[in-house]
Amino acid sequence: MDNAKAESKHFWGFPLTHFSYFFIWAVVNGYLTLWMEQVAHLNGTESGAVFSMMAGISLIFQPIFGVVSDKLLFKKTLILTISIVGIFIGPYFQWVFMPILHVNAFLVAIVTGTFLSFILNGGVSVVEQYVQRASLANKFEYAHSRVGGSVAGVVASLVAGPLFLWKPNSIFWACSAAAVVLTGLLLFTDKIDLKNAAAAGDTSNSLDMKTVMSVFKIKNLWILAIFYMGASALFDVFDQQFIIFFKTFFDTAAQGTLVYSYMSSAQTAIEFCLMFPMPWIINKIGSRNGLIIYGFLTCIRILGSALAPNWIFIVGFRLLAGLEMPLLLTSIMKYIAGAFDIRLYATVYALASNFAKQVSVFIFSSVAGKMYDVIGYQHTYVIMGIVVFFITLFAAFFLKKEDPVQAGEVEGKVASDTDPNTLE
């Protein structure tokens, strides 16, 4: 009984950490565009510049944050810095954004993009890898903690809308409040079982830049990055303008929007429910196989949507996303832990996942937008689906199998001094 209580104490802070962080993420990404249009009165080009800066600057933050996170391991210096900076979201948009805008619209894009990228686009890998490593040390499933992030998306959609209608700036003060909670959790609640810390990385403080740079010599890193750039990035690009395509199946835009809202809610509910059994499923089939299945499901969803005769079929294919996200999130965390030197976990995650994906989304977004105008949504989706199929097929042949013990898929003793080249 005492052991069960100890394990509970070591777990429950982390879902709340995920909740408070992803609440900020959901609010900013859901309402920043609307705020910039209705409050700051930015045009589409100026608003787009803010998001472009967020994506572009994150390409600088992510590799640096990955290396620093691997060096810090369970030291909270970086993650606490990110959470404390998040507290200033409310003050920034209340008192700083507009004065900078009056100076120059491009300047406000640079400052805002850098500020938000530090917290969100760059900071997300820091939060994710920290909780994943905690799950290895504290012996809980990462996906069970990540449920907090799914709940945050639902709560943010319920809370942020009324707050925006009441006082638009209040949504950013809600983000500041969430950042205060996040900081408190990191300081007082998120505890690591240091007896098992070696299962999550190098505890000897011997990690040097030579070891970190050796990651670029690992062929499997580039194969994983190609898979992520093809499958996961196209997943996001496909969803960017999906609502516009979906509305074409209805007589009125209002009807399409209503059905889309119900469909999105159902998708979120499926995602929430599947987060609980997904670790057990991935432990049975293996995280590498989980990634491959995710890739083929993404292909089916894109091609199915392109060839669907009516909106009912599209809804069916769309609901697959509720399966895809738990599958991807659980598989990628376990796979990186099991297929690479655990000491370089954050570096691999930042490079092969976040960095590669941001580059790919940046490229594919503009290409896809042009293709929508020239050949239409259906033909563009067919091409996307074919690309995802061949990239997933490539990964199925060349992506190496993970070590199931190191990945946390089976019980066993994990070596703490893994050579970074042995899992190449």
Image (tube, grey):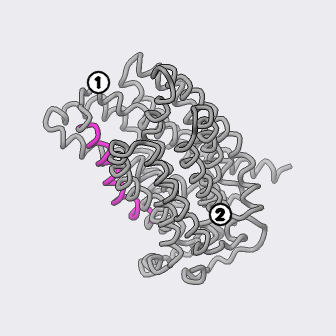
Q: Can residue 92 be seen from the camera position used here? A: yes
Amino acid tagged 2: Leu
Residue 41, picture quadrant: top left
What label sits on residue 39 in the rendered view?
1
Numbered disc total: 2
- Residue that protrudes farthest toward the left in the picture: 103
Residue 50 at x, y = what percent? 28, 42
C-alpha span from label 2 to label 1 = 48 Å
Residue at figure coordinates x 18%, y 42% from the top left: 106
Q: Which mark is residue 194?
A: 2
Element under disc 2: helix
Residue 416 falls in which quadrant of the image?
bottom right
Looking at the picture, which amino acid does disc 1 mark?
A: Val
- Residue 102, x across and y down, in percent: 15, 32
Determine if residue 73 is in view. Answer: no
Image mark for residue 401:
none
Work out whether residue 67 or residue 271 is closer to the camera in this orientation and state it.
271
Residue 208 is left or right of residue 293, and the answer is: left
- Residue 266 higher or lower than 303, as above or below: above
Using a 10 Å C-alpha cutoff, classify the residue at mark 1 as few (fewer than 14 neighbours), some (14 to 19) or many (20 or more).
Answer: few
Q: Nearer the viewer, residue 269 or 149?
A: 269
Check residue 57 for magenta coloring.
yes
What residue sits 18% from the left and 43% below the top?
A: 107
Residue farthest to the top, as pictured: 166
Q: Residue furthest right?
A: 1
Which is the main secondary structure of the residues drawn in magenta? helix
Going from the N terminus, do you reach mark 2 or mark 1 first?
Answer: 1
| Foreground of the two, 330 or 307 | 307
Q: Which residues are magenta?
A: 46-66
Decide if residue 57 is on the left or right side of residue 296.
left
